[in-house]
Image (cartoon, rainbow, N blue to C red):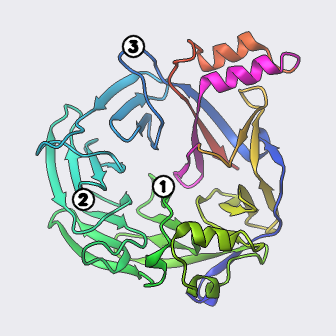
């Protein structure tokens, strides 16, 4: 991809600091998901926020809550039967509030109602990692560098009505297909009020605009002139571990794991020196706020949230940053910092019920 064909967004620096949540967000909402003996959620792999509903998956089941954390429904059909799925790799909600569930292992898309009934299914010819529903007719499928089956492209456009692939995008590089397999929970950001989305990938410095008709390059992310040169990918690497061993010998930055935009800023995440960074690039003056963690001074009494780690972060609706936190970890922080934290008030905020409490979900509208 030629840089000249797209707008360049430059991350001007690489920080090692945390930033206050109030400095980067216009509003924050923390939702404690209801907990009961029959409602215990494992590690969250995907969160979607549409209207007043929160949808999330732990890879086995799909859950629905309202904006106050009240439980609204569950789809739990994991199995090997004809009306079941082998696991939830990704999901999307259609206009009827039914759920398209992607089973990567089963190479299948299945449409489920909240009563657990399978309403539709589509067999896939290759492994797919992530999906993006643009309309009830059009879905994009991201496979990355998987050459399984007859696949030779990273993205395909699927017509849900005819169940046929209509177009392919981003041809797979044969060398990268030998080693470059890095999964991310984020590849698409779609605004509910728009018929377009953005596509981004960890080892592609170009962000693409996605519409029902096409995928086109939109932005090139320049990370302080430290991007991995294209020639680096041309070497032969035995596997992904060998690739990273070679990568970490250099002062390279790479991304993008999150991309969005607000009225004021572009929102970009990237990796540098083994840490995930998040940057806000001002649209008017290109000044950058760059950080590796967020101190939630809005409603969690400066609880530090590290961007690097096993917590999945999601960007949706252009500028809404979403992530889940474990209540027990927040309480541990409070008990270790009694001079800084009002423990009783914090417990009220996260509706603390004990160490087995379901995660809390934080929704931050980025400035």
Q: Which residues are magenta?
A: 311-339
Q: Which residue is mark 3?
A: 37
Residue 219 is left or right of residue 46, and the answer is right
The mark nearer the N terminus, 1 or 2, is 2
Q: Residues within 10 Å of mark 2 (few under 14, many from 20)?
A: some
The secondary element bearing badge 3 is classed as loop
Dot 1 and dot 3 residues touching (CB under 8 Å): no
Q: Which residue is mark 2?
A: 107
The mark nearer the N terminus, 3 or 2, is 3
Whether residue 328 appears in magenta in the rendering, the answer is yes
Hey, which quadrant is residue 131 in on the image? bottom left
The mark nearer the N terminus, 1 or 3, is 3
Separation of marks 1 and 2 at Cα, in angstroms = 27 Å
Residue 209 is left or right of residue 137, and the answer is right
Residue 16 is left or right of residue 125, and the answer is right
Disc number lying in front (1 or 2): 2
Separation of marks 3 and 2 at Cα, in angstroms = 33 Å
Q: Which residue is mark 1?
A: 191
Residue at 28%, 41% in the rendered image: 97
Identify which residue, 307 or 135, lies in the foreground: 307
């Amino acid at each position: 991809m030629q840089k000249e064909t797209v707008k360049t967004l430059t991350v001007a620096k690489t920080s090692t600091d945390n930033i206050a949540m109030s400095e980067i967000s216009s509003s924050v909402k923390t939702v404690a998901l209801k907990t009961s003996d029959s409602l215990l959620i494992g590690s969250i792999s995907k969160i979607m926020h549409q209207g007043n509903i929160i949808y999330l998956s732990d890879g086995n089941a799909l859950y629905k809550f309202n904006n106050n954390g009240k439980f609204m429904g569950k789809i739990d059909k994991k199995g090997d039967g004809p009306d079941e799925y082998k696991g939830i790799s990704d999901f999307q909600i259609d206009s009827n509030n039914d759920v398209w569930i992607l089973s990567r292992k089963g190479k299948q898309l299945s449409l489920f109602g909240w009563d657990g009934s399978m309403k539709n299914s589509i067999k896939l010819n290759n492994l797919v990692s992530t999906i993006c529903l643009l309309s009830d007719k059009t879905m994009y499928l991201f496979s990355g560098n998987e050459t399984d089956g007859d696949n030779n492209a990273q993205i395909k456009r699927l017509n849900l009505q005819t169940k046929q692939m209509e177009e392919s995008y981003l041809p797979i590089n044969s060398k990268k297909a030998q080693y470059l397999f890095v999964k991310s929970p984020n590849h698409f950001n779609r605004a509910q009020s728009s018929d377009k989305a953005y596509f981004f990938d960890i080892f592609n410095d170009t962000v693409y605009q996605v519409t029902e008709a096409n995928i086109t390059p939109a932005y090139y992310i320049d990370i302080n002139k430290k991007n991995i040169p294209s020639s680096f990918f041309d070497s032969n690497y035995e596997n992904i571990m060998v690739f990273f061993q070679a990568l970490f010998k250099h002062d390279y930055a790479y991304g993008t794991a999150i991309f969005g935009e607000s009225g004021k800023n572009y929102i970009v995440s990237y990796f540098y020196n083994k840490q995930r960074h998040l940057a806000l690039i001002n649209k008017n003056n290109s000044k950058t706020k760059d950080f590796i963690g967020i101190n939630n001074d809005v409603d969690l009494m400066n609880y530090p949230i590290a961007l690097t780690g096993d917590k999945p972060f999601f960007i949706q609706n252009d500028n809404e940053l979403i992530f889940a936190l474990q209540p027990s970890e927040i309480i541990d922080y409070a008990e270790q910092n009694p001079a800084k934290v009002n423990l009783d008030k914090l417990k009220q905020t996260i509706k603390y019920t004990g160490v087995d409490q379901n995660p809390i979900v934080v929704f931050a509208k980025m400035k």
